[in-house]
Image: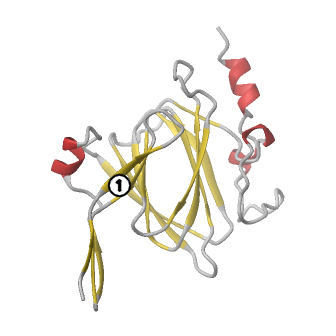
Amino acid sequence: MVEIIDASIQTSNIDGLKIITPKQVTDDRGTIRELFRFSWLKENGIVSSFEQCNNTLTHRGAVRGLHAEAMTKLVTVASGEVFGAYVDIRPESPTFGAVQTVRIVPGVMVLVPNGVCNGFQAAGETADSEYIYFFDQEWKPGMPGSALTPLDPELGIEWPIEIDVNDRSQISEKDLNAPTLAQFKEAHAS
């Protein structure tokens, strides 16, 4: 038996952040997923040209982010499961300060606009997760960007696995000490 899932796009409560289900074909052997199809992305008004792709192996319970580099990202997992968290820190955005969370498993993708913080926790039951990032620009040292601490209570992010702030295998010093949303607002007040 063959099951075909057509590609679809859902909007979110963050302006420009989209949750994407790519085309998928499943048969007795397994599943094929389209991670990137130029024509489909272009037809749907989504970034259709990427310059870099990274694969991040992350151990269960570890958190990466919240980072907002000056680039648009298309993210998914090749294996495992992550709890994705996104925060709009674009000062001129109508959804500034909005938070969106998404359970990402193979077959779920998120388009993260330039200036929106991207973070995740590897949340699979037993295994590590492989998170894939497509970037519309190559990362360069000194590239502009911002970050927020993923543990800011104002954000209300309920990470599925408790985070031990003293465990560097769960959260980096840099992420732990990133500013809160209130500190970000104060630093960027005009």
Extreme left residue here? 39
Its colouring scheme is secondary structure
Location of residue 179 by image quarter: top right
Left or right of 111? Residue 6 is left
Picture quadrant where residue 170 is located: bottom right
Name the kind of residue labelled 1 in the image: Cys
Q: Residue at x 26, y 57 (%)?
A: 36
Looking at the rendered structure, the number of numbered marks drawn on it comes to: 1
**SS at mark 1 in the image:** strand
Residue 68 image offset from top left, x and y in percent: 53, 37
The image shows residue 94, relative to residue 118, as above or below, that is: above
Name the foreground residue: 95 vs 139. Answer: 95
Identify the residue at image location x=25%, y=42%. Answer: 44
Furthest toward the top, the residue is: 190
Image quadrant holding the C terminus, namely: top right
Locate residue 54, reporting x and y percent: 40, 57
Left or right, 68 with respect to 166, comes to: left
Does residue 1 lie above or below 175 as drawn? below
- Mark 1, other Cα within 10 Å: few <14 / some 14–19 / many ≥20: some
In the foreground, 100 or 2: 2
Q: Residue furthest bottom?
A: 28
Q: Return the residue nearer the eye: 43 or 88.
A: 43
Q: Where does label 1 land, which residue?
A: 53
With 135 as the anchor, is 159 left or right in this view?
right
